[in-house]
Structures are given as C-alpha cells and as structure tokens.
Image (cartoon, helix red, strand yellow):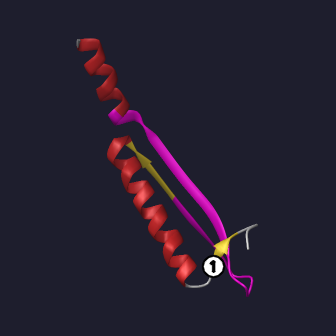
Amino acid sequence: MRSIALVFLMSLVTACATQRVGMINDKGDELTCERTGYGFFGALATANYYNECVAQAEQRGYHVKGSQ
C-alpha cells in the first residue's frame, strides 16, 4: 500500500506538461501560445492558460498556422 501511495505522490510532483502552438493573422503577424507546468496542478494550469490564449487570439483574427 505504501508503494502505491508513493508512486501516486511522485506522479503529482514530477509530472510535466507543455503546450505550444504558432498562430498567424491575415496580415502575416505571428504569435505563439505556449505554457509549461510541473506537477498535477501545473498541468491543469497549463491547459487553462493555453486554451485561454488560443481563444483570445482567435477573437483577434488569428488562426493556427497551416489551417485556414
């Protein structure tokens, strides 16, 4: 039982998440939405920041590079 708890605890502390996307608008201006987080809560914060960045960029007329 102890080993299971230790493995679970280590995964919360050592997990890493990185999300990155390049975006471009019709004028050719580019921006990057990028975030890295460590641990379980860092991974959650990374996803939230990334999704918010992409949504705000799309509202300003940007789209993911390579898609139209």
On whether residue 24 falls in the magenta region, the answer is: yes
Quadrant location, the N terminus: top left
Inspect the image, locate mark 1, and give the three-letter code of the amino acid beneath it.
Answer: Tyr
**Image spot of residue 50 (x, y percent):** 48, 62
**Label 1 residue SS:** loop
**Image spot of residue 17 (x, y percent):** 48, 46
Q: Is residue 48 left or right of residue 68?
A: left
The residue to which callout 1 is attached is 62
Dominant SS type (magenta): strand
Q: Residue furthest front?
A: 68
Q: Residue furthest left?
A: 2
Quadrant location, the C terminus: bottom right
Q: Is residue 48 above or below residue 26?
A: above
Q: Is residue 29 left or right of residue 52?
A: right
Q: Is residue 4 above or below residue 57?
A: above
Q: Is residue 45 left or right of residue 9?
A: right
For the point 33% across and 35% down, the residue is: 12
Give the magenta-colored segment's residue range.
Answer: 12-34
